[in-house]
Amino acid sequence: MIIHFAAESHVDRSYYNVSDFVQTNIKGTQSLLELVRKHSIPRFVHISTDEIYGDIPNGMVDESAPLLPSDPYAASKASADMLVQSYGKVYDIPFIIIRSSNNFGPYQYPEKFIPLTITNIIEGKKIPIHGTGEHVRSWLFVEDFCSAVDTIIHKGKNQNIYNISEDERTNLQVLTLIAELFNLNIAQFKEHTSD
């Protein structure tokens, strides 16, 4: 089995260096699919993202929702998803696609929202909030995500897509919760940026 976690995943960085995202997320996936095809690997598990669904006005979407990526990162992951599905149809590759919401947890790269918030609070710096901070995101603890992946790779069915999601909160709610853990008032740390 091949479980394909590798990805360029920082949305803001995708605005400035699209080619890295195309190289890793699309061409990297295609390279692995060729290995699966060449060596008749019995299962290819592609780790994707809920970002490929784009902006969702209300609630959640299921696995059959249209892919409407709204940035180069999401577009590269959506392209990889479609490539995996096409290899399934054309070459009968046994695949599973797992689309996860935002993971957080220990050792996460410090440019991501939660670790950036924590380190900025510790250092007394402002925390960038896009727009009003009311953008809702689904948050999933990384160990819960890993448990879900483990279950899916052992019990999931080939040629299926699985969404994994958890707790929905606005960016401002997450920021407020973290500041409260430090016994601080969030107002002194917010720094609104344009969307």
Image (cartoon, rainbow, N blue to C red):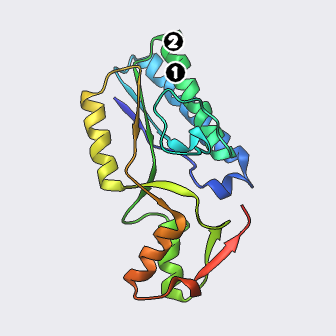
Percent x, y for residue 42? 34, 20
Residue 187 sits in which quadrant? bottom right
- Which residue was labeled with disc 1? 85
Callout 2–callout 1 Cβ contact below 8 Å? yes
Front residue (pair 149, 92): 149
Residue 162 sits in which quadrant? top left
Q: Is residue 150 above or below residue 106?
A: above
Front residue (pair 96, 179): 179
- Which residue was labeled with disc 2? 89
Q: Is residue 4 above or below residue 179?
A: above
Percent x, y for residue 148? 30, 42
Quadrant assignment for the N terminus: top left
Q: Is residue 187 above or below residue 31?
A: below
Distance between mark 2 and mark 1 Cα atoms: 6 Å
Which residue type does callout 1 highlight? Answer: Gln
Front residue (pair 12, 28): 12
**Looking at the image, which residue is at 48% across and 86% down?**
122
**Looking at the image, which residue is at 36% across and 24% down?**
43
State the count of labels.
2
Front residue (pair 150, 100): 100
Could one spot residue 112 in this view of the protein? no
Disc 1 secondary structure class: helix
Which residue type does callout 2 highlight? Answer: Lys
**Looking at the image, which residue is at 61% across and 82% down?**
126
Q: Is residue 96 above or below residue 134?
A: above
